[in-house]
Image (tube, rainbow, N blue to C red):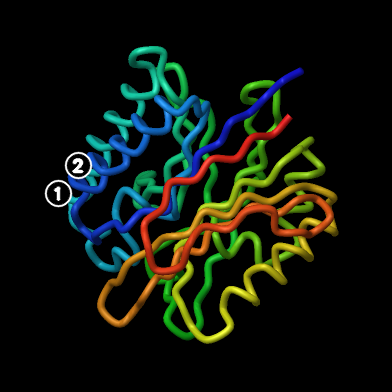
Amino acid sequence: MDTLRLALAQSDLLVGDIAGNTTRLLAVAAEARAAGAHLLLTPELAVAGYPPEDLLFHRGFRRQVDAALARFAAASGEGGGIALLVGHPEYAGERIFNSATLYSGGREQVRHRKACLPNYRVFDEKRWFTPGTQPTVAEFQGFRLGVLVCEDLWEPEPSQLAKSQGAELLLVLNASPYEMHKQRAREDIARRRALDVGLPVVYCNLVGGQDELVFDGQSFVMDAAGQVTQRAPAFAESFAMVEFR
């Protein structure tokens, strides 16, 4: 029987500290590998920190992102390796995407571009990013993993498209800031998606603060029946493991 041991890196990451964020996440990856995990899931835009805003337009920032992604690719193939699903900015000519890339065996396997860009209240993602247009399903460890980034979960279509492409599990990278009753809203939305497509949801959220934004973590795992089976602590870094068979 296929088994997938998945680790969630609920990490406190600093906007603009690309080298430091990368080193921090690779340390968590080493811990996860020692614990027997096959795959580490990071928050949204983990490499850059959230929100990177106009730093995205600096050429030096782009070079640092490229160097960081090369480190993640290399780490996924070292010493038996651990696969890494990493949130990062993606540069494609003049366009910038809010992306998540799966690295395994020393190279990139698949890349998802966030399709639903929030542009309300504290969010201004349409200023910086181009929306993706395609669902992403990665084959890994005998499973078909649907990859979503934050707001992709809040709209029904991305989950439905991932299911239509054969996804058996939804992995969601998030940088969702705290507000009153926000965790209830997140879990209500995840429950709707889980029940709609009949798939478990793994939700990895950022923790820490950036200017006026506070990220509360509370990453969680939800089964296909919409029940939360595991929840990380609030306002604290956390390393959690979950196993799927």
**Residue 151 image position (x, y, % from top left):** 58, 65
Q: Please give the name of the residue rendered at 54% of the width and 43% of the height, measured from the top-left corner.
A: 112
Q: Quadrant of residue 50?
A: bottom left
> Contact, CB < 8 Å: mark 2 with mark 1?
yes
**Residue 18 image position (x, y, % from top left):** 22, 48
Q: Nearer the viewer, residue 59 or 194?
A: 194
Q: Please give the name of the residue rendered at 71% of the width and 41% of the height, measured from the top-left corner.
A: 169
**Residue 179 image position (x, y, % from top left):** 49, 83
Q: Quadrant of residue 152?
A: bottom right
Q: Please give the name of the residue rendered at 58% of the width and 58% of the height, measured from the top-left corner.
A: 231
Amino acid on which disc 2 is placed: Arg
Q: Which residue is mark 1?
A: 60
Q: Which residue is mark 2?
A: 63
Crowd rating for badge 1 (residues with CA inside 10 Å; few <14, some 14–19, many 20+) = few
Q: Nearer the viewer, residue 85 or 158?
A: 85
**Element type at mark 2:** helix
Does residue 167 lie above or below 172 as drawn? above
Q: Is residue 97 visible?
A: no
